[in-house]
């Protein structure tokens, strides 16, 4: 196989990503647009970052390399909004499955 065949490959997915990045998008939105799983999309985005085609604005937020919008602090990892577990009330009643045993008297 000639060496020149390794220099160029069609990149329809990366072209679709670049066309879709008219504004900053999340990795999940990009993955849905190209109809691929999120890890596949982020793999393409990482390769495109190394080539200087896209920039990562924050947690799972990407834009074209020529993007001049809000500062990076605008795009942050979402907070964990789950409530902390509450303490369960302590019951003094015996468990319903406990068998009464012989009482020990001294």
Image (cartoon, rainbow, N blue to C red):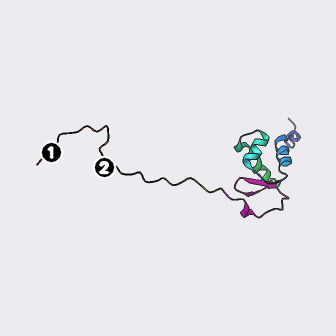
Using a 10 Å C-alpha cutoff, classify the residue at mark 2 as few (fewer than 14 neighbours), some (14 to 19) or many (20 or more). Answer: few
Say whether marks 1 and 2 touch (CB < 8 Å).
no
Residue 57 falls inside the magenta stretch = yes
Number of marks present in the image shown: 2
Q: Which label number is shown at residue 1?
A: none
- Image quadrant holding the N terminus, namely top right
In the image, taking residue 93 as reference, residue 66 lies left or right, namely right
Tell me the residue at 72%/46% (across/down).
28
Tell me the residue at 83%/59% (across/down).
67
Q: Label 1: state its secondary structure.
A: loop
Closer to the chain start, of discs 1 and 2, is 2
Name the residue that disc number 2 marks. 92
Q: Which label number is shown at residue 104?
A: 1
Does 34 appear above or below 81?
above
Q: Given this view, does label 1 or label 2 mark the residue nearer the observer?
A: 2
The answer to whether residue 21 shows anywhere in this view is yes
Tell me the residue at 21%/39% (across/down).
101
In space, the residues marked 1 and 2 are separated at their CA atoms by 20 Å
In the image, taking residue 78 as reference, residue 23 lies left or right, namely right
Tell me where residue 38 sits by quadrant. top right
Most distant residue in the left direction: 106
Residue 17: % across, % down: 82, 46
Residue 105 falls inside the magenta stretch = no
In the image, taking residue 92 as reference, residue 56 lies left or right, namely right
Tell me where residue 2 sits by quadrant. top right
Residue 46: % across, % down: 75, 50
Q: Label 2: state its secondary structure.
A: loop
The answer to whether residue 43 shows anywhere in this view is no
Residue 31: % across, % down: 75, 43
The residue range painted magenta reads 55-77
Does 43 appear above or below 84?
above
Residue 56: % across, % down: 75, 56
């Amino acid at each position: 196989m000639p060496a020149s065949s390794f220099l160029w490959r069609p990149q329809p997915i990366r072209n679709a990503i670049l066309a879709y990045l008219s504004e900053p998008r999340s990795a999940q939105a990009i993955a849905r647009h190209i109809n691929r799983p999120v890890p596949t999309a982020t793999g393409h985005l990482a390769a495109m970052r190394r080539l200087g085609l896209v920039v990562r604005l924050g947690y799972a937020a990407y834009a074209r390399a020529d993007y001049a919008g809000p500062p990076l602090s605008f795009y942050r990892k979402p907070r964990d909004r789950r409530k902390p577990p509450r303490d369960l009330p302590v019951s003094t009643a015996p468990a319903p499955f406990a068998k009464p045993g012989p009482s020990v008297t001294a």
